[in-house]
Amino acid sequence: MLSSNPIDTAPSREQTLHTLYEAAELEHCLMCTYLYAVFSLKSSVEEGLSAQQLEAVTRWRRTITQIAIEEMSHLTSVWNITAALGGAPRVGRFNFPLDPGFLPARVVVKLAPFNMATLQHFIYLERPADSSELDGAGFEPERLFIRGADSPRFTPMALNYDTVGTFYEELGENIRQLVQAHGEAGALCGDPALQLTDADVALPGTKRVICSKTALAAFDKIITQGEGALHNAVGSHYQKFVEIREEYLALLAADPSFTPAFPAATNPVLRRPARPEGRVWLEDARAIATVDLANSIYGLMQRLLAYTYAVPTQDPDKALSLDLAIGLMHALVPLAERAARLPAGPSNPECHAGVSFITLRDSAALPPGPSARRFFRERFEQLAQGAIRMQEPGDPRTTAAASIMSKLSQKAMQGFDLSRPAHAAVTPAKPEAPAAVSPPPATSVQDGVEHIEGEKLTLVYEVKRCIHARFCVTGAPTVFLANVQGPWIHPDAMDVERLVDIAHACPSGAIRYKRRDGRPDESAPPVNLAGIREAGPYAFRGDLRLNGVPAGYRATLCRCGASKNKPFCDGSHHDIGFNATGEPPTGTSTDALPVRDGPLHIDPQTNGPLKVSGNLEITSGTGRMVARITGAFLCRCGHSQNKPFCDGSHATVGFIAD
């Protein structure tokens, strides 16, 4: 006799992936709602805050932004686990506000400006399992229901849960049962090269999932850092929001009129909604244009993030797509802040607009290869042109968005190679040599770079990279004449081989050359190095690619945060009295690298660290080995307590840099 229910009670891989997709949607939604509240916060005394209130609101902005970044880290962990199980990570989600059923009844998710009710809602979402915290006013569920089924099903079914912490505990149990049924290798059978790690993205704790232990550790991190942490968990999202509430109440007691944020719309929408209840239809033309562009930037960011999980680590498209996606987030911020300061329209005169985070109907990864690269190039160019046209005189936010989008578009055009087949092996390209100039004249200047013709070589001098290390004027004083009027570089004044050695000694790469005698030009060094100068910059040597563009074999890059020529050093560390050791302790990453050369990609993160990808040995100023790595984020704000590595201090100190 057949059983009335032939299903094994153990969860299937399909059911586990289905639940992970909901986890991704949940983390994604929380991140967006936190950011929406941040975008609505006021930022100056001209916007109605006292100096004391501004100081508090500025701290709140940083705290909630950091929480949103940690939610992104949680999301990346969920994506990594999904990829480890052989699934394609769910990058999309449903539009705001979420209709009943997508999440449990009491997990209400919608966009709302920062105020006491919204803050209380955040506390409620992040509460521990035994908490008595109530939800914020106005966040009551539309209707109460219980999800799930009474018995196992082949069709994946949603789980019901009271807190997010219990949801992740259930997911962890599913992973354990899958491993028990299929073994470690059978359960976690996905390609690890498709995942992201903290060497790829500046999200501390982002680890590759290769076994059940690493998967369960990721869930534990999500619970203890965020949703479901204990009442007394120091640094948890719950505790951080509670601390903001205490300070908020104290400021209100001192000034009952204190209003920390603009009245941004609750659940703004760009088109007439089929269900108008609880939504604000934007009608103001400037608000519509701003939100439309912001949403499109957000949609492109989703596509790029999905694409990063479709290509393996060794494919240059992966790092480029990730860097561009992070850059788009920086472009979104000024537009979202602007939207919160514009009127919603005549139908809602009491509130402002707000970015609505509209999602694409399908944000799955595009098929890797030339067609995807062409799509991204076209879309970046379109949105960059739109941002330029939308600039308004005197509005720094639209100007900032246009500048960021223009740079990202250029990076996409340069980085996405349409001629390379999908997953083709990449041969490191030689840096482009400076274009030779035909005499006369003996000296020419191209884009600020001097080209000085000699009989056997052309010397190249790039003043903006020079840090005045004086290897040239002391090692070849007849070639490089210090403190003279007129021509000061004379390539034929000494033996060409000795002159080549002097050029190689230039740490900044300001002096380069191109041979004219048939001898080989400078080649990449056999070992990629980054030397840490005492109270000074980083000295890189390798086949350098700066923002994806060949940058020669030598460069000195700012690590004090004060250079006016970032990312290059300009000597400002002397002016500000920068005090940082050139002899940090030897770290844990000391295993010999199987390959020590190859392309070294250096990508300065907007308002953040230097992202370094490639084989690299970091050395002290005296040459002692500090670390051997294939990817890292190096501090360039000057404030990290873990130099040379980034520890997130750039966000705390408000570091600004392209």
Image (cartoon, helix red, strand yellow):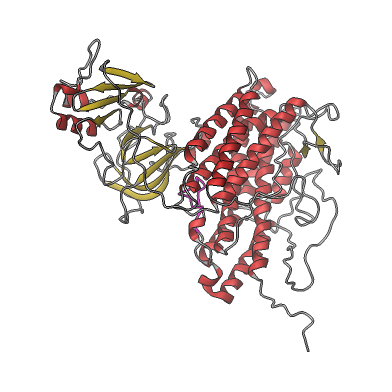
The magenta stretch spans residue 200: yes
Residue 511 showing in the rendered view: yes
> 617 or 511, which lies in front?
511
Q: Is residue 200 toward the left or the right of residue 125 in the image?
A: left
Q: Which residue lies most toward the left here?
A: 495
**Image quarter of residue 621:** top left
Residue at 44% x, 34% y: name it.
637
Figure disc tally: 0
Q: Main secondary structure of the magenta part?
A: loop
**Image quarter of residue 538:** top left
Residue 201 image point, x, y percent = 50, 46
The magenta stretch spans residue 198: yes
Q: Is residue 369 positioned above or below 35 on the image? A: below
> 194 or 656, which lies in front?
194
Residue at 50% x, 45% y: name it.
202
Residue at 68% x, 40% y: name it.
245
Q: Which residue lies most toward the bottom here?
A: 1
Residue 230 image point, x, y percent = 63, 56
Q: Which residue lies most toward the top here?
A: 485
Q: Is residue 350 toward the left or the right of residue 410 in the image?
A: right
Residue 70 showing in the rendered view: no
> 191 or 452, which lies in front?
452
**Image quarter of residue 562:** top left
Residue 22 image point, x, y percent = 68, 57
Q: What stretch is highlighted in magenta?
A: 196-208
Residue 533 image point, x, y percent = 30, 35
Q: Is residue 303 positioned above or below 592 on the image? A: above
Instruction: Identify the image quadrant of the N terminus.
Output: bottom right
Residue at 74% x, 41% y: name it.
111
